[in-house]
Image: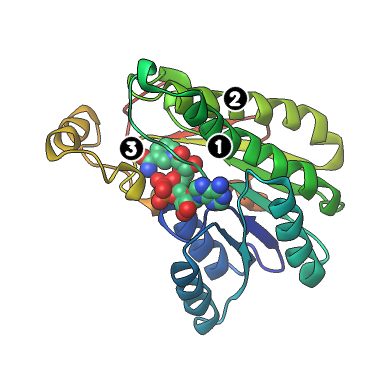
Amino acid sequence: MLNGKTAIITGASRGIGRAIANIFAENGALVGINYIKSDKKAKDLFNQIEQSGGKAILLKGDVSKQKDVENILKTFTSKTKKIDILVNNAGIYERSNFENISYDRWNKVISTNLTGSFNLCKKAIAYMKAGGKIIFISSQLAFKGSLHGADYASSKAGLLGLMRSLALELASKKINVNAIAPGTIDTDIIANYSKEIRKKRINEIPLKRLGTPNDIAYTCLFLASNMSDYITGETINVNGGLYIH
Ligand code: NAD
């Protein structure tokens, strides 16, 4: 589905980003694996993709830092000359109530989850001359709000505003811009959930299971492929029925 396409995926060394990188590579894309710290995990993914006949480029860097993003784009485009697909997936989440959110933490969450995506879009669009696809990984909490993460919910709601605005602005350049709002997906980001919270979450989900990284990756594949060429400015909710719009 993505033969000949080039794709950058942020935060791709583990979890949802890793699943997206794998599925994109299996479908013929050359994938740029952005990661911030985990050299080993990123290299393992790189080797796994190359050994299966796919193509990948390692892109170390912090999406919240403009200089890092410039380097990420430079490394990628010096080899590919173009970007067809950008998946803004990198994100952080810590549970705590509003009173315990310090200014430092607020700034870190916004600069990673929201400004990080802004940084990538800012630089990547110039390389999408033949059109392209931009996909944001938001969250159901953008709609519901969060009891234990006002900073996170705000950043994820902000992404939807950015997504809709870019969809309007970039339509004339044949760049489709969409978002995915995952429900509760079984990755490291929810590793600090106690057994009780986990059980409670599963019980609340009509499909009676947590989502898997592949549930999100397949939706992302659809949005990255030409099967979704007439969709822009949309958010696809992938949440097992937990929050039906
Ligand atoms: P994860 O913690 O496994 O993955 C997040 C990735 O982002 C990690 O690899 C991390 O190193 C990377 N990252 C963090 N800060 C970064 C930075 N400054 N620069 C570059 N990379 C950075 O969690 P995940 O569940 O795979 O999350 C992926 C995305 O999905 C996140 O945006 C998250 O908010 C979103 N999401 C997850 C869930 C869920 O339940 N797991 C639900 C809704 C949305």
Q: Is residue 135 above or below residue 242?
A: below
Would you name the residue on which mark 1 appears? 113
Mark 2 vs mark 1: in front: 1
Answer with mark 3 or mark 2, whichever residue precedes in sequence.
2
Q: How crowded is mark 1: few (under 14 residues within 10 Å), some or many (20 or more)?
A: many
Q: Can residue 100 be seen in this view?
A: yes
Asked if the residues shown at circle 2 and circle 1 are in contact, with their CB atoms under 8 angstroms apart, the answer is yes
The residue at label 3 has a CB less than 8 Å from ligand 1: yes
Would you name the residue on which mark 3 appears? 184
For label 3, the SS is: loop
Q: Which residue is drawn at 17% across and 38% down?
A: 194
Separation (CA) of disc 3 from disc 2: 19 Å
Separation (CA) of disc 3 from disc 1: 17 Å
Q: Can residue 217 be seen in this view?
A: no
Mark 3 vs mark 2: in front: 2
**Count of labels shown?**
3
Answer with mark 3 or mark 1, whichever residue precedes in sequence.
1
For label 1, the SS is: helix
Q: In this view, does 113 lie above or below 90?
A: above
